[in-house]
Each structure stands twice: as C-alpha cells, then as structure tokens.
Image (cartoon, grey):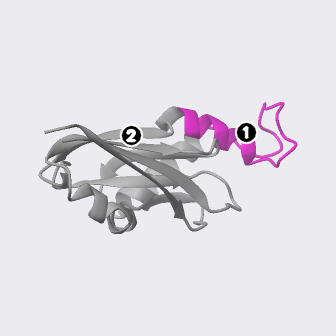
Amino acid sequence: MAAKWAQKTVVIPAQRRGCHLITPKILREIEGDLSGFKCGLAHFFLQHTSASLTINENYDSDVQADTETFLNRIVPEGHNAPWKHTMEGPDDMPAHIKSSMFGCALTIPITDGRLNMGTWQGIWLCEHRDHANPRKIVITLNGV
C-alpha cells in the first residue's frame, strides 16, 4: 500500500467565549477522506492565536464550563491586568496566553477509517475572546 495524503481547511463559525465540542462538525467535514485510511495520523492546526484546540471530555458539558472557569482564574484579565499588549482589547492578551497553554495543534491516530480516540474524548475548540470571528482549522490526513 502506498502512503497517501489529504488536506482540508474547515471553518468553524464564530463561537461564544468558552470551550466547545467540535468533533461532530470535524467528522462531517472529513468523513469522506477519513474513511479511505486504514492506518495513519490526522493533524489539526488552528490558524489563530487567541483560540486553542484540546482533547477532553465529550459527554458532560460541565467540564467545558469548569475549564473556562479555571482559565479565567489563572490568567488575569481587564484593565487592571499587568499586560502591555492591550491595543486589541482587554481580553486579547489573556487570549494569547490561554492559546499558548493549550496550543493550536492536535495529532490523533487513524485506525480503520476512524479517529482513534477514547470513548469519552472529543475535540474542543476553546474560544478565548469575547467577540470571536470564525476559526479555521487545517486538517491533514496521512497514512495508508
């Protein structure tokens, strides 16, 4: 079997601030390509610096809310925060820090045409801005 590649950019509509389960949307967008891979890797790259990607609980939405609460407690925000970068608003620099904490990329194994995640795992887009724009994720599939 020869190795093959597929790549697609998926646009996630603007979300409210917080962590959002996007696995169903991602799977709808890539299922045609994904089904052609027996074994491989799926790489997800978020083209933004004020949002992030992570893998976490896909069942209980309280985990999403608690994660947002945690992030807001450890990264100060507002006009009294110590940040120099404030030209884009008081939520921008905290968003950059939160993005760096979780990161902008994920790699998930592909097995028999499916993302090989645990039962309770899902892909989250964490939006760290109060007034977000649509977010672009470049998805690259590689394998056999």
Percent of width and height locating residue 130: 69, 59
Numbered disc 2: secondary structure:
strand
Magenta region includes residue 79: yes
Residues 105 and 71: in front is 105
Q: Secondary structure at mark 1?
A: helix
- Point out the image quarter for the N terminus: top left
Q: Which mark is residue 93?
A: 1
- Give the camera-side residue of 121 and 65: 121
Closest to the observer, 6 or 59: 6
In the picture, measured across the screen, residue 100 lies left or right of residue 27, that is right
**Mark 1 or mark 2, which is nearer the start of the sequence?**
1
User: What secondary structure is the stretch in magenta mostly built from?
Assistant: loop
Q: Nearer the viewer, mark 2 or mark 1?
A: 2
What is the spatial separation of the Cα atoms under label 2 and label 1, in whole angstroms? Answer: 23 Å
Q: Which residues are magenta?
A: 75-100
Q: Is residue 78 above or below residue 64?
A: above
Instruction: Give amino acid for label 2.
Output: Leu
Q: Dividing the picture into quarters, in which one does residue 93 lie?
A: top right
Residue at 65% from the left image edge and 44% from the top image edge? 95
The quadrant of the picture occupied by the C terminus is top left
Q: Residue at x 34, y 61 (%)?
A: 30
Q: Residue at x 29, y 64 (%)?
A: 32
Q: Which residue is under mark 2?
A: 106
Residue type marked 1: Met
Q: Is residue 73 visible?
A: yes
- To which quarter of the image does residue 141 belong? top left
Residue drawn 41% across the image and 54% down it: 124
Residue 98, magenta (yes or no): yes
